[in-house]
């Protein structure tokens, strides 16, 4: 039986680790430690082959970089925030969709983000720029979380509650505006690309389940609104006194 999440309104975290989240955390940390410690060494330069570089992907067909770049991170805070967001937004999605569909969605968003990053840097002539991090995939998870649980409230910085749908809008706007800045040091276009690929997948992929969920939620919202209007109408009728014949 599918668990009911509608009674959970404000949350900082979704609880224990699900299988997909657990293995993503393990792989990310397992690759980050040697990558971080070996920076500047020959081994570290070898690990850079896993980073996403437009020249390698387009000119040398290093397609694997579209997958492997997601498991490298530039620093402790980079991996910390990405893994925290992965756990916060991905756990409930995996519980609802199942591990296989969740992992598929995660990689579609991550690869889509990588394609956007490669396309923009190639267009700008930045062939040697390297991109690392799971942020594109995480932004895709944030988008899905906002779509599936639009009224779930998130405690931002442990203090400020904000509904998931508004959080998605804010981060989407930041990613869009950031993508207009060239050479900012952050691949905002990858963040935006992860969200766009995630949205496309929810609409056209996943057997329509994402949209079916939205339709059910919309119908439930319409019913709740109709009940409220009916209650207001009945209260107004009660104020008029007894009917006369």
Image: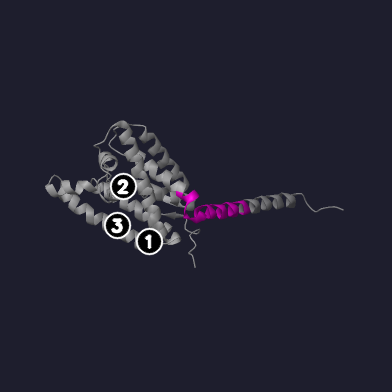
Q: Position of residue 141 (x, y in %)?
A: 40, 51
Asked if the stretch drawn in magenta spans residue 81, the answer is no
Spatial separation of the CA atoms under disc 2 and disc 3: 18 Å
Q: Nearer the viewer, mark 1 or mark 2?
A: 2
Crowd rating for badge 1 (residues with CA inside 10 Å; few <14, some 14–19, many 20+): few
Q: Are marks 2 and 3 in contact (CB under 8 Å)?
A: no
For label 3, the residue is 25
* Residue 205 or residue 31, whichever sits in front: 205
Please tell me the numbered disc located at residue 30.
none
Q: Residue furthest left?
A: 41
For label 1, the residue is 15
For label 2, the residue is 66
The first of marks 3 and 1 along the sequence is 1
Q: Are marks 3 and 1 in contact (CB under 8 Å)?
A: no
The residue depicted at 78 percent of the width and 51 percent of the height is 241
Spatial separation of the CA atoms under disc 1 and disc 2: 30 Å
Q: Position of residue 171 (x, y in %)?
A: 40, 42
* The magenta segment: 201-223
The first of marks 2 and 3 along the sequence is 3
Going by the image, does 196 lie left or right of 31?
right
Crowd rating for badge 2 (residues with CA inside 10 Å; few <14, some 14–19, many 20+): many
Residue 207 visible to an observer of this rendering:
yes
Residue 227's place in the image compared with 114, above or below, is below
Q: Residue furthest right?
A: 245
Asked if the stretch drawn in magenta spans residue 202, the answer is yes
């Amino acid at each position: 039986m599918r668990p009911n999440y509608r009674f959970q309104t404000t949350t900082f975290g979704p609880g224990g680790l699900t299988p997909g989240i657990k293995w993503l955390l393990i792989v990310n940390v397992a690759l980050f430690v040697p990558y971080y410690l070996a920076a500047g060494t020959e081994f570290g330069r070898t690990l850079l082959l896993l980073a996403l570089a437009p020249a390698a992907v387009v000119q040398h067909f290093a397609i694997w970089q579209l997958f492997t770049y997601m498991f490298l991170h530039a620093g402790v805070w980079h991996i910390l925030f990405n893994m925290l967001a992965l756990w916060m937004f991905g756990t409930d999605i995996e519980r609802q969709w199942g591990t296989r569909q969740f992992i598929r969605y995660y990689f579609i968003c991550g690869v889509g983000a990588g394609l956007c990053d490669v396309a923009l840097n190639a267009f700008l002539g930045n062939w040697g720029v390297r991109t690392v991090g799971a942020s594109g995939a995480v932004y895709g998870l944030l988008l899905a979380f906002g779509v599936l649980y639009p009224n779930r409230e998130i405690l931002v910085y442990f203090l400020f509650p904000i509904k998931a749908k508004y959080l998605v809008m804010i981060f989407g706007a930041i990613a869009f505006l950031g993508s207009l800045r060239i050479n900012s040091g952050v691949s905002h276009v990858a963040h935006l690309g992860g969200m766009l690929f995630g949205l496309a997948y929810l609409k056209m992929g996943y057997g329509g389940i994402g949209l079916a969920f939205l339709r059910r939620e919309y119908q439930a919202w319409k019913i709740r609104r109709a009940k409220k209007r009916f209650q207001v109408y009945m209260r107004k009728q009660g104020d008029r006194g007894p009917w006369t014949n």
